[in-house]
Image (cartoon, grey):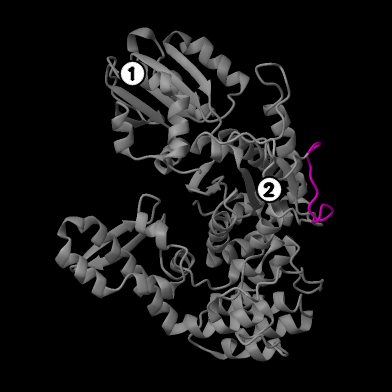
Amino acid sequence: MLREPYHFMSLKEEVSGSWKSCLSCKTVILLDDYTTKLLSLCCKMSDLLAEGITVVENVYKNREPVPHMKAIYFITPTKKSVDGLIDDFISKSSSRYKAAYVYFTDTCPDNLFNKIKSSCARSIRRCKEISVSFFPYESQVFTLNVPDAFYCCYSPTLENTKDKDAVMEAMAEQIVTLCATLEENPGVRCKSTPLGNASRLAQLVEKKLENYYKTDEQSQIKAKTHSQLIVIDRGFDPVSTVLHELTFQAMAYDLLPIENDTYKYKADGKEKEAILEEDDELWVKIRHKHIADVIEYLTLSSLAHLMKKMPQYRKEITRQVVHLNIAEDCMSKFKANTERLCKTEQDLALGTDAEGQKVKDSMRVLFPVLLNKSHDSYDKIRAILLYIFSTNGTTQENLDKLIQNVQIESDSDMIRNWEYLHVPIISSQQKQPRRDRSSEETFQLSRWTPLIKDVMEDAIENKLDSKEWPYCSQCPPTWNGSGIVSARQKPKASYQDERRSNARLILFVIGGITYSEMRCAYEVSQAYKSCEVIIGSTHVLTPRRLLDEIKSLNKPKDMVCIKDE
């Protein structure tokens, strides 16, 4: 588990000496931009207050001195943050705080460490590197918060450049801090592809894991733990990135203007906001359900019953109202345009219709969408891409006609630039074999299953082809993901011991993950209870955002605007 309480508790344990030593007096915590976002994902102000921290400040900003207070600095090891620390203790007579307890998110470079030593060493009571250079997005999802990695890794303008090398090195270091936080030294493997990003990153991670776990307290090399880390390029499954999803979370983020996990709505004639977060138990319970099941769960009649019978549960009722609003907004968009798109998309993605009959003419399936004036250019481009993916590429002549007839010349790079992800647009290649899911119950408009779910299940069942998914590690651990217990295995004494002794599968996708892929981590963990699946990426994608990023790949770097998470 990555989100609160686990991640905040692990962070708190790391700095517990400082918490305890500061409890006797008022305490301030200093954060930079990176750690502000990180801490906000792990805990709330009430959690900090409970630990004796009464003030939260930005290390970059000018502040009034409070010399009677001790200060905890939770910062990144960068020049800007270190300079902020040093400025607070430039001289003993003008120190802003009584003492400093410094915690870096990653290894502090020697030049910055020496600068601290020569400037304010007397004021520092503790200085430690705690390895938390990743963002716990959900309980089983993490990001590195580097959306520009998509451009750096896939743009032809940066191929074989120092910019790309630097991004790869930084991503590898961040992934290692995730493994360290989880106390894992996983066997590292990747999808073997012509592009080579996955292989390159996997090798970097393995090398940095070797260095991180070089020796333990007994000067022994730390052995591989009972876990796997699989690195995948974004082009591995293009279909899941453009398909309209009808599960609640994916549908809401695709169809509604949700920014920074904040949903805006009207209630009682007023504009209101609701944050979609892990602390909302109802959101966590229903976010992966199909929209039809969500609406059945959140009915007005049940709300009215709650209002009458349980007025003390007003907070829970308000949350139900929020999610019912989201569901109704989704359905309004769905009924207006999306419902007609979904059948076309599913038929193209799977190559079969709802009755299981093979689609004989994909263009005939696509054509009504292109003629429909109520669909915007993004929806038409998504449908065209699904047509191209379903036919494993098309001819240059056919592509040119499609772009011209739909009048999307200005956005044509949203289609053409998939070639940079090694997804066939003009050329053709053989389709990947899929797991048989014909016996699984599903809704007619939600028949597609993301490819990454196949990978998760095959990895746990030890069915991944070692040639197609080679290990980068020298000595991959014996994999026991499916739960076959060794006779020599010791009995588990507690939940914490059980969590650590179970297998753990970590997947990292270079260039963004979708909400449907995030959902798969939870579904597979539930189905294979002996293995926890954690998925992560550079950032989280919506279809519209991905198309915008694809479009920018052939532009010069100084003309590209990268949207932060």
Q: Position of residue 486 (x, y in %)?
A: 70, 41
Please tell me which residue is depicted at 29% across the width and 18% down the height of the picture.
Answer: 69
- Near-viewer residue (502 or 175): 502
The residue that disc 1 covers is 22
Q: Earlier in the sequence, mark 1 or mark 2?
A: 1
Q: Nearer the viewer, mark 1 or mark 2?
A: 2
Find out whether residue 467 is within the magenta segment.
Answer: yes
Q: Residue furthest right?
A: 467
Q: Residue at x 70, y 27 (%)?
A: 222
> Magenta residues?
465-475
Q: CA distance from mark 1 to mark 2?
A: 47 Å
Secondary element under disc 2, as helix, strand or loop, is loop
Q: Amino acid at mark 2?
A: Ile
Identity of the residue drawn at 43% across and 72% down: 291
Q: Main secondary structure of the magenta part?
A: loop
Is any atom of residue 46 visible in this view?
Answer: yes
Instruction: Label 1: state its secondary structure.
Output: helix
Task: Name the amino acid type tagged 1.
Answer: Cys
Q: Which residue was labeled with disc 2?
A: 484
Looking at the image, residue 426 lies above or below residue 199: below
